[in-house]
Amino acid sequence: MGEMTSTYGRSPEDVRRWPADPAARQALEQYFAALRPDSRDLQFELDAEGLDFTGADLSGLELLQAELSQANLSGVRLVGADLAGAWLIAAVLRGADLSRCSLRKAQGRKCDAQDAVFRGAVLDRAEFENADFRRADFSEARFGRAWLSGADLRDADLHSCVFGRGALSTGLLQARLAGCRVEDAAGSVSGPADVGTDSPHLIDGAELWRWFADRGASLVEVAEPRVRE
Protein backbone atom coordinates (compact mmCIF):
# COMPACT_ATOMS: atom_id res chain seq x y z
CA MET A 1 0.00 0.00 0.00
CA GLY A 2 1.09 3.57 -0.55
CA GLU A 3 2.24 5.78 2.27
CA MET A 4 -0.17 8.47 3.35
CA THR A 5 0.89 12.10 3.03
CA SER A 6 -2.02 13.85 4.78
CA THR A 7 -3.56 13.53 8.22
CA TYR A 8 -7.03 12.02 8.41
CA GLY A 9 -9.03 10.43 11.21
CA ARG A 10 -7.95 6.82 11.77
CA SER A 11 -9.66 5.78 15.01
CA PRO A 12 -13.19 5.28 16.42
CA GLU A 13 -12.75 8.50 18.39
CA ASP A 14 -12.57 10.37 15.08
CA VAL A 15 -16.09 9.30 14.02
CA ARG A 16 -18.39 12.25 14.52
CA ARG A 17 -21.60 10.23 14.25
CA TRP A 18 -21.95 6.50 13.71
CA PRO A 19 -24.40 4.99 11.21
CA ALA A 20 -27.63 3.69 12.69
CA ASP A 21 -27.29 0.29 11.01
CA PRO A 22 -25.34 -2.19 13.22
CA ALA A 23 -23.68 -3.91 10.24
CA ALA A 24 -22.29 -0.63 8.93
CA ARG A 25 -21.01 0.32 12.38
CA GLN A 26 -19.37 -3.08 12.77
CA ALA A 27 -17.63 -2.71 9.41
CA LEU A 28 -16.20 0.64 10.52
CA GLU A 29 -15.08 -0.76 13.88
CA GLN A 30 -13.32 -3.67 12.18
CA TYR A 31 -11.64 -1.26 9.79
CA PHE A 32 -10.29 0.93 12.57
CA ALA A 33 -9.19 -2.10 14.58
CA ALA A 34 -7.03 -3.23 11.65
CA LEU A 35 -5.37 0.17 11.20
CA ARG A 36 -2.10 0.77 12.99
CA PRO A 37 -2.28 4.25 14.53
CA ASP A 38 1.52 4.43 14.76
CA SER A 39 1.97 3.85 11.01
CA ARG A 40 1.24 6.02 8.01
CA ASP A 41 0.82 2.94 5.82
CA LEU A 42 -2.67 1.71 4.99
CA GLN A 43 -2.89 -2.01 5.76
CA PHE A 44 -6.62 -2.62 5.43
CA GLU A 45 -9.53 -1.16 3.44
CA LEU A 46 -13.05 -0.59 4.69
CA ASP A 47 -15.20 -3.47 3.39
CA ALA A 48 -18.74 -2.12 3.34
CA GLU A 49 -20.29 -3.18 0.06
CA GLY A 50 -24.06 -2.80 0.11
CA LEU A 51 -24.21 -1.52 3.70
CA ASP A 52 -26.44 1.29 4.99
CA PHE A 53 -24.61 4.33 6.42
CA THR A 54 -27.71 6.47 6.90
CA GLY A 55 -27.28 9.03 9.67
CA ALA A 56 -23.48 8.87 9.77
CA ASP A 57 -21.01 11.74 9.82
CA LEU A 58 -17.70 10.37 8.51
CA SER A 59 -16.12 13.74 7.87
CA GLY A 60 -12.33 13.89 7.94
CA LEU A 61 -11.82 10.12 8.01
CA GLU A 62 -9.22 8.16 6.08
CA LEU A 63 -11.27 5.83 3.88
CA LEU A 64 -8.68 5.23 1.21
CA GLN A 65 -9.73 2.53 -1.30
CA ALA A 66 -12.89 1.79 0.70
CA GLU A 67 -15.31 -0.73 -0.83
CA LEU A 68 -18.64 1.10 -0.80
CA SER A 69 -20.21 -0.25 -3.98
CA GLN A 70 -24.03 -0.36 -3.71
CA ALA A 71 -23.81 1.16 -0.23
CA ASN A 72 -26.45 3.61 0.95
CA LEU A 73 -24.71 6.90 1.75
CA SER A 74 -27.74 9.13 1.32
CA GLY A 75 -27.40 12.28 3.39
CA VAL A 76 -24.11 11.10 4.90
CA ARG A 77 -21.50 13.75 5.71
CA LEU A 78 -18.04 12.99 4.29
CA VAL A 79 -16.64 16.50 4.39
CA GLY A 80 -12.87 16.49 3.93
CA ALA A 81 -12.68 12.68 3.97
CA ASP A 82 -10.10 10.72 1.98
CA LEU A 83 -11.92 8.46 -0.49
CA ALA A 84 -9.08 8.24 -2.98
CA GLY A 85 -9.34 4.99 -4.91
CA ALA A 86 -12.68 4.16 -3.27
CA TRP A 87 -15.22 1.90 -4.94
CA LEU A 88 -18.59 3.65 -5.20
CA ILE A 89 -20.07 1.66 -8.06
CA ALA A 90 -23.88 1.92 -7.98
CA ALA A 91 -23.67 3.52 -4.52
CA VAL A 92 -26.49 5.85 -3.44
CA LEU A 93 -25.14 9.27 -2.45
CA ARG A 94 -28.29 11.35 -2.69
CA GLY A 95 -27.88 14.57 -0.74
CA ALA A 96 -24.53 13.45 0.71
CA ASP A 97 -21.97 16.13 1.56
CA LEU A 98 -18.54 15.37 0.09
CA SER A 99 -17.23 18.94 0.20
CA ARG A 100 -13.40 19.08 0.01
CA CYS A 101 -13.36 15.30 -0.23
CA SER A 102 -10.53 13.51 -2.03
CA LEU A 103 -12.04 11.27 -4.70
CA ARG A 104 -8.90 10.86 -6.77
CA LYS A 105 -9.07 7.64 -8.82
CA ALA A 106 -12.43 6.74 -7.24
CA GLN A 107 -14.66 4.34 -9.18
CA GLY A 108 -18.28 5.47 -9.18
CA ARG A 109 -19.92 4.01 -12.26
CA LYS A 110 -23.73 4.27 -12.14
CA CYS A 111 -23.78 5.82 -8.68
CA ASP A 112 -26.81 7.93 -7.74
CA ALA A 113 -25.55 11.24 -6.39
CA GLN A 114 -28.50 13.49 -7.08
CA ASP A 115 -28.38 16.70 -5.01
CA ALA A 116 -25.03 15.69 -3.49
CA VAL A 117 -22.44 18.31 -2.60
CA PHE A 118 -18.91 18.01 -4.00
CA ARG A 119 -17.89 21.61 -3.37
CA GLY A 120 -14.10 21.92 -3.61
CA ALA A 121 -13.66 18.15 -4.00
CA VAL A 122 -10.78 16.61 -5.95
CA LEU A 123 -11.83 14.09 -8.62
CA ASP A 124 -8.65 13.79 -10.67
CA ARG A 125 -8.68 10.52 -12.67
CA ALA A 126 -11.93 9.44 -11.01
CA GLU A 127 -14.35 7.44 -13.16
CA PHE A 128 -18.06 8.19 -12.84
CA GLU A 129 -19.39 6.73 -16.06
CA ASN A 130 -23.21 6.91 -16.32
CA ALA A 131 -23.47 8.42 -12.83
CA ASP A 132 -26.50 10.51 -11.87
CA PHE A 133 -25.33 13.95 -10.72
CA ARG A 134 -28.51 15.90 -11.34
CA ARG A 135 -28.58 19.11 -9.26
CA ALA A 136 -25.27 18.19 -7.60
CA ASP A 137 -22.97 20.99 -6.42
CA PHE A 138 -19.49 20.77 -7.94
CA SER A 139 -18.59 24.43 -7.42
CA GLU A 140 -14.81 24.91 -7.17
CA ALA A 141 -14.25 21.17 -7.63
CA ARG A 142 -11.13 19.98 -9.45
CA PHE A 143 -11.85 17.32 -12.05
CA GLY A 144 -8.44 16.91 -13.68
CA ARG A 145 -8.49 13.85 -15.91
CA ALA A 146 -11.81 12.54 -14.60
CA TRP A 147 -13.97 10.35 -16.84
CA LEU A 148 -17.67 11.33 -16.82
CA SER A 149 -18.87 9.56 -19.93
CA GLY A 150 -22.67 9.37 -19.99
CA ALA A 151 -23.00 11.09 -16.61
CA ASP A 152 -26.19 13.08 -16.03
CA LEU A 153 -25.16 16.56 -14.88
CA ARG A 154 -28.38 18.35 -15.71
CA ASP A 155 -28.97 21.39 -13.48
CA ALA A 156 -25.70 20.73 -11.62
CA ASP A 157 -23.62 23.62 -10.27
CA LEU A 158 -20.16 23.60 -11.90
CA HIS A 159 -19.30 27.23 -11.39
CA SER A 160 -15.63 27.99 -10.75
CA CYS A 161 -14.69 24.34 -11.18
CA VAL A 162 -11.41 23.35 -12.85
CA PHE A 163 -11.38 20.71 -15.54
CA GLY A 164 -8.27 19.00 -16.96
CA ARG A 165 -5.25 20.44 -18.73
CA GLY A 166 -4.76 20.29 -22.48
CA ALA A 167 -4.87 16.73 -23.78
CA LEU A 168 -5.30 15.54 -20.16
CA SER A 169 -8.90 16.69 -20.32
CA THR A 170 -12.02 15.87 -18.35
CA GLY A 171 -13.95 13.35 -20.43
CA LEU A 172 -17.53 14.47 -21.02
CA LEU A 173 -18.40 11.97 -23.76
CA GLN A 174 -22.21 12.09 -24.04
CA ALA A 175 -22.47 13.63 -20.57
CA ARG A 176 -25.74 15.55 -20.17
CA LEU A 177 -25.12 19.22 -19.38
CA ALA A 178 -28.48 20.93 -19.90
CA GLY A 179 -29.19 23.55 -17.25
CA CYS A 180 -25.68 23.41 -15.77
CA ARG A 181 -24.28 26.50 -14.09
CA VAL A 182 -20.70 26.81 -15.43
CA GLU A 183 -19.66 30.46 -15.06
CA ASP A 184 -15.97 30.97 -14.26
CA ALA A 185 -15.18 27.32 -14.95
CA ALA A 186 -11.80 26.71 -16.58
CA GLY A 187 -9.62 23.93 -17.93
CA SER A 188 -9.91 21.39 -20.70
CA VAL A 189 -12.83 19.10 -21.57
CA SER A 190 -13.44 16.59 -24.33
CA GLY A 191 -16.75 15.71 -25.89
CA PRO A 192 -19.01 15.36 -27.64
CA ALA A 193 -21.34 16.41 -24.81
CA ASP A 194 -25.13 16.33 -24.77
CA VAL A 195 -26.66 19.76 -24.17
CA GLY A 196 -30.19 18.84 -25.21
CA THR A 197 -33.02 19.63 -22.82
CA ASP A 198 -35.81 17.36 -24.04
CA SER A 199 -33.92 15.27 -26.58
CA PRO A 200 -30.22 14.47 -27.22
CA HIS A 201 -28.15 17.24 -28.83
CA LEU A 202 -24.48 16.33 -29.08
CA ILE A 203 -21.96 19.10 -29.71
CA ASP A 204 -18.17 19.21 -29.78
CA GLY A 205 -15.23 21.38 -30.83
CA ALA A 206 -15.97 25.05 -31.44
CA GLU A 207 -19.68 24.53 -30.79
CA LEU A 208 -19.03 23.06 -27.35
CA TRP A 209 -16.57 25.87 -26.57
CA ARG A 210 -19.24 28.42 -27.55
CA TRP A 211 -21.77 26.67 -25.30
CA PHE A 212 -19.45 27.16 -22.31
CA ALA A 213 -18.48 30.70 -23.35
CA ASP A 214 -22.10 31.80 -23.66
CA ARG A 215 -22.56 30.71 -20.06
CA GLY A 216 -19.63 32.65 -18.63
CA ALA A 217 -16.93 30.00 -19.03
CA SER A 218 -14.88 31.24 -21.98
CA LEU A 219 -11.69 29.85 -20.38
CA VAL A 220 -12.87 26.29 -20.90
CA GLU A 221 -10.94 24.65 -23.74
CA VAL A 222 -12.20 21.74 -25.84
CA ALA A 223 -9.64 19.04 -26.55
CA GLU A 224 -9.74 16.15 -28.99
CA PRO A 225 -12.19 13.40 -28.01
CA ARG A 226 -10.82 11.00 -25.44
CA VAL A 227 -11.17 7.25 -25.32
CA ARG A 228 -11.37 5.38 -22.04
CA GLU A 229 -7.97 4.02 -21.09
Image (cartoon, rainbow, N blue to C red):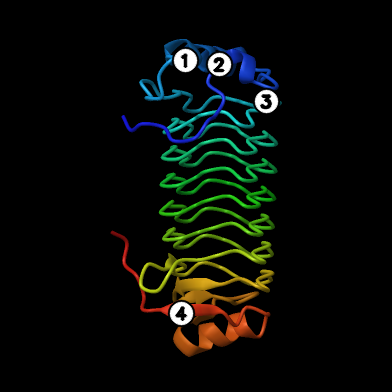
Between 124 and 171, the residue placed more toward the observer is 124
* Type of amino acid under label 3: Ala
Say if 152 sits above or below 110 in the image. below
The residue located at (71%, 26%) in the rendering is: 55
Between 140 and 57, the residue placed more toward the observer is 140
Earlier sequence position, callout 4 versus callout 2: 2
Earlier sequence position, callout 4 versus callout 3: 3
Question: Which quarter of the rendering shows the N terminus?
Answer: top left
The residue located at (48%, 56%) in the rendering is: 130
* Type of amino acid under label 4: Val
Residue underneath mark 1: 37
Residue underneath mark 4: 222
Between marks 2 and 1 in the image, the one whose residue lies nearer the viewer: 1
User: In which quadrant of the rendered view does residue 51 lie?
Assistant: top right
Q: CA distance from mark 4 to mark 1?
A: 45 Å
Residue underneath mark 2: 11
